Image (cartoon, grey):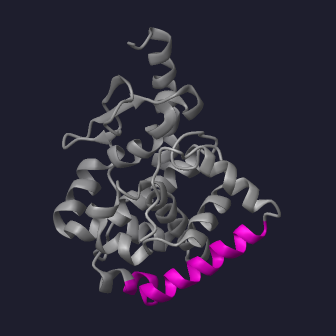
Amino acid sequence: MSSSEEEVQRLLDMGEALHADVAALHPADVELDGEIRVELHGRYRRTSPYVDDEGTVHLWRFSEAEGGYRAMYAHELVHAIAYDSLVAPTLAESGSDAGFYLEGWAEYVALLVDPDKTGFPLFGSDEDVVVGHWLQQGGPTLADYRARHEALNMRCQGQAYILRASWFRYVDEELGREVVWDLATAREGLDPDSVERVLGAPLAQVDADWAAWAAARYEEHPDADAQAEAYRAKMGWYEPCLE
């Protein structure tokens, strides 16, 4: 089904609002694109939304319950808004080290600017509950997601996207926005040694502190287990990575 003029106008209005909010969360020294091309491809089938090498956002329409085109809109705008000045150079210079940080930053910002979205990765559920649930279930660690980004990113997407975003939230709230910006812009590089210099601590220690922080937030919800069960009911399509 093609997009109506009304739907396109809604997306334009939403995009302008999201663009302003996403821009405000970037440091002043990052050059941002004032205009972003967005291509709409109709109903979602197999291809996930993405940003191509020209910085164009490609979106598919998910179900109404997931927000339609809105489902992944904010996330992809984060990639696109600084594609030429940040994303492409970071990928070229940092290679396989970049994926965890680029994707974690994009999803964290998406959650900040569009907290009411009902699509992936939370499907309307509470972030603390979802993160705590996946930590209880086990599966790949953050170290695994860093080291094996290409292999795990899509296969373990239900876990990877929200766990990375939660880690960025922890760093932002506990270590400070400047630390987050240093990571998001790869100012010192994204190899493990450079990241640890930015964090001021070993990655293993920061990851452990994040896990304890996230577990405590989960426990603050008296009905967390029931909420987690309801969340998993919405994720019937997803085969968790519990290796």
Give the residue displayed 75% in from the left and 61% down from the top. Answer: 224
Image-based side of 213 in relation to 16, left or right = right
Quadrant where the C terminus sits is bottom left
Q: Which residues are magenta?
A: 196-220
Give the residue displayed 73% in from the left and 61% down from the top. Answer: 225
Give the residue displayed 46% in from the left and 68% down from the top. Answer: 242
- Tell me where residue 2 appears, x and y as whole percent: 38, 12
Image-based side of 5 in relation to 36, left or right = right
- Tell me where residue 187 appears, x and y as whole percent: 32, 71
Image-based side of 70 in relation to 188, left or right = right
Q: Is residue 27 visible?
A: no
Residue 212, above or below 163? below
| Of the pair 127 and 55, the residue shown nearer to us | 127
- Tell me where residue 34 appears, x and y as whole percent: 35, 37
Residue 234, above or below 139? above
Report if residue 45 lies within the magenta region: no
Give the residue displayed 43% in from the left and 63% down from the top. Answer: 241
